[in-house]
Amino acid sequence: MKTKKWLSTLLAASLMVLLLAACGKGNGEGASSASPSPSGSGSAAPATQSAAPADLSGNLVVWTYFDQVKILAEQFMSKHPNVKVDVQVFPGDQYQTKLMTALQSGKNAPDIMDLDHGYIGKFLESPYLADLSAMGGEDLVKTYVPYVTAYGRSADGKLRAISDNSSPGGFWYVKETAKKYLGTDDPDQISAMVDSWDKVIELGKKVAQDSGGKVHLIQGASGLFDIEAFNTETWVKDGKLNIDPKWQETYATQLKIRSEGVDAKLGFMSSGWGSALNDGSVVLTSMPSWATFMIDNKDGKAKGKYGIAKTPEGWYNGGRWEAVYEKSPNKELAYEFLKFVASPEWQKYNLEKTGNMPGNAAVFDELQDTFKGEMYGDQLILKGFAEQMKNMPAREPNKYDDEILSKWVKVASQGIDNNTPYDDVVAAFKKEVKNTYPELKVE
Amino acid sequence: MKTKVNKSAYGYLFISPFFIAYTVMGLVPILYTLYLSFTKWDGFTDPVFVGLANYERLLHDTFFYQTIGNTLIIWIFSIVPQLILALLLALILNEKFIRGKHFFRAVFYFPHIITPITLGVMFALMFDWQTGTINKLLMNAGLIQDPVHWFNSPWWSRIIAASVICWQYFGFNLIVFIAGMQSIPTEVFEAAQVDGATKKQVALRITLPLLRPVFLFTLITSVIGGLQLFDAPLMLGDGPGNSGRTMIMYLYETAFKAFDYSYGGAIAYGIFVIIMFFTAITTRATRMLKE
C-alpha cells in the first residue's frame, strides 16, 4: 500500500516536472558557454589587426532572419577553427519580437544580432547594443560607404552596428527582352534612355504600343516608393509628421505611369513579379541588389542573361546590420566576428558567392574594373554602383520612418489603383499616422 | 453518524499540472496584458503608468469601431452560407441510398485540417489582380475583358475573406450536423414513413426541429471563433480603406508591428468586452429558444 502511494506521488511529480520542463524549454540553450578569447580579453591587440587564427576560441550565438549568414559563419569558422559560431535563423515578422523579448529579459539573448534597415532605429537607441566605437570600431568603417556607416550610429554618434552590405538599386533586365523592345541591351545606352521619369513614361508608352499592350516597361508604379524612400526627407522632424513635397511629384508620376500603361501593376516580391523578372515579360525591374536571390540560376540557367541599368535616381533599399549584445559574456570575441564582417576579405567572398554588394567602399574601388557577375556577361556591375553608393546622402535612422513609409505605401498604392487625388491620399494617410502615433503632431 | 469523505491531499497533486500550466500560460499573460493596458510601453523602455489613457484613446478610435463592423460583416457572410451548405449536404449525405458517404464526408472535412494561413495565402494568390487563377479563368471564358482588382473593392475583400472561412469550416459543421441527425431516434422517421410523409416533410418537420440543439451549439461556438478572425484575413491584407481589417488584425498591427504593446493591451480588453457582449446575447437567445 505504502509503495503504491509512493509510486503514484512520484509519477505525479515527474509529470509536473516534465510539464514545467516543456514550458521552459530552451531557457538555457542560448547562454553560450564562454571561454573568453585570450586575444580579445584586453584591448592589447590593435583593433584593426585580425587576430591570428589559432588565437581565438570560444562559442558565439548569432541571431538572424537571413539564411545566408550561415555562409558568413562558415567562413569565419574556417579562418578561426577554434571558434564555434551557432547561427540561429528566425525568418519573418517573429524575429523582431523574439529579439526584443530576449534582450529585455536578458535570458537566452544572442551574442550577435542582425538588425534590419527597417527597424534598426529603435534598437540603436536602446541600452542593449555595445558601443563599437569604444572597441575600435571606427577603424573598421574608415573606408565604408557613408550611408551604410550612418545607419549603424546611435544619436550620440557612437557606432553600434556594422553591415557587410550596401544595397544599391537599379533596373535589372533580361537582355533578350531589352534588345527586342528597346533596340539595345547595352547598360549605358539603356541607362541614358531612362534617366528621367518623363523619359520612362515616354518609353513605356512606346513599349506598350509595340507589344500591343502585352509587355510593359516596368513592373509596378509602386517601385517608385522604394526608389524615393531615401531620396526624400525623413517622415518625422521635431516630433512632427513631415511629408516631403517630393512625394506629391512622385505620386503624380505614379498616376501617369499607371494611366499610360507603362507598368505591369505587379508589386515588389509578389509571385507575378518574380516570374516576370525571370521570364522577361516586363522589360525593366527596379530592385535592390540583394533581391537577385529571386533569379533562378539553377545549373547556370541565368548565365549572362541579365544586365543592370541605372534608375532615374540612385537609391538603395534595405540592408542588414550586425550588432553585439551589450551584456554578452563574449563581447570581445563577438567584436572579432564583426571585424571579419567589415573586412574586404569577407565582403569580396560574399560578392562573388552571393552577389551581395559590399558595404566597404574599398571593395568597390578594388574590384570595380574587374568584377563581373556570372549572370551579367561582360558588364562591370560594380562600376555602375560605385559612384551611386558613395554619393547617396547619409541619413540618420529613427524609429518611425519605416512604419510610416509603409503606411504611405499602403494608402498611396490604393490611391494609384483608384486614381485618387493627392489631397485625399494625404488626408487618409494623416489619419492613419495620427491613429498609430498619437504622440506625433500632424497638421 | 458523520460520513467521512476521503480528502486525500494527493488529489490536489494530481490536478495541479493543469492549474500550473494554466497559470503560467494563460492567467499570467492575461493579467500582465491588463497591467500593460494601464501603461505606456514600447517594448524597450520601462512601462510608465498612464491610468486609463489607453482606454480613453480606444473609445475615440474610429479605426477600432471600423474593425468591429468589418469583423461582424465577414462573420455573417461566412456563417450563413456555411450553415446552409453544411445542413444541405448533411441532409443529402444522411440519406441511405447515397453511395460513398464516407468518402464525401472525408473530402468535405479536408479543408478544416489545413491551417488558415495556408488557406489565406492560397486565396490571395487565386484572387490576385494580375496573375490570379480566377481572373485568368474568367478572362479565358470571355466573361470579363480586364482583370478584376478584387482586393480593391471593400465588399469583394470581405466576401473573399468570408469565403475562406466558410470553405474551411463547412465540413466541420457538416460532421456535427450528421452526428446530430444520427442521434435522432429512427422510430420517429419510421412512424413518419408509415404515415406517408414526403422527404421534404420529414426534413422540415422532423429533422430540422430535432436538430435545434446542434444548431445552437454551432452558433455559439462560431460567435466566439468568428469574432476572433485573424490568420486568414491577415494574409489577404487590410483591404481598401482598411475595409477587410478585423479586430484581432488591428490588435496585431498595433502591438506587434507598431510595437505599442500598451495600447494593444487595451484593444485586447476592448475585444474581450465585445466578445462577452455577443456571447451573452447568444446565450440569452438560446435560453429563449429553449423555452
Image: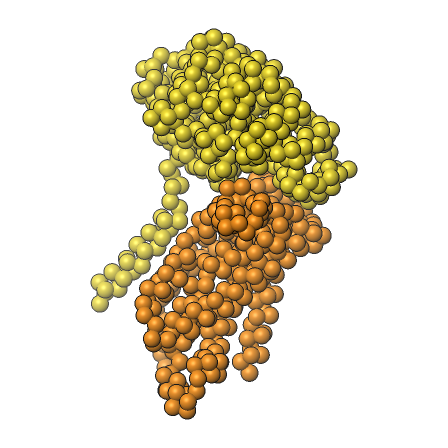
From this view, report whether residue B266 is shown above or below residue B85.
Answer: above
The residue lying toward the viewer, choosing from B290 and B34, is: B290
Residue B289 x, y percent position in the rendering: 56, 79
Label tally: 0
Identity of the residue drawn at 47% across and 13% down: A380
Of the pair A383 and B48, the residue shown nearer to us: A383
- Residue placed most toward the observer, A152 or B289: B289
The residue shown at (45%, 58%) is: B168
Quadrant of image for the N terminus of chain A? bottom left
Q: Position of residue B56 (x, y in %)?
A: 70, 52
**Observer able to see residue B106:** yes
Up/down of A42 relative to B280, above or below: above
Point out the residue furthest to the bottom here: B195
Image quadrant for the C terminus of chain A? top right
Which chain is assigned yellow?
Answer: A
Vertical relation: A246 (above or below) B9: above
Chain shaded orange:
B
Q: Residue furthest right?
A: A443
Q: Point out residue A195 in the picture as x, y percentages from the top left corner.
A: 62, 19
* Residue at x-position 58% and y-position 74%: B284
Image location of residue A184, percent across then percent down: 52, 18
Is residue A121 something one can see in this rendering?
A: no
- For the point 23% across and 64% down, the residue is A4
Q: Nearer the viewer, residue A437 or A423?
A: A423
Answer left or right for A407 relative to A59.
right
What scheme was used to colour the molecule?
Answer: by chain
Query: Relative to A371, is B256 on the left or the right?
Result: right
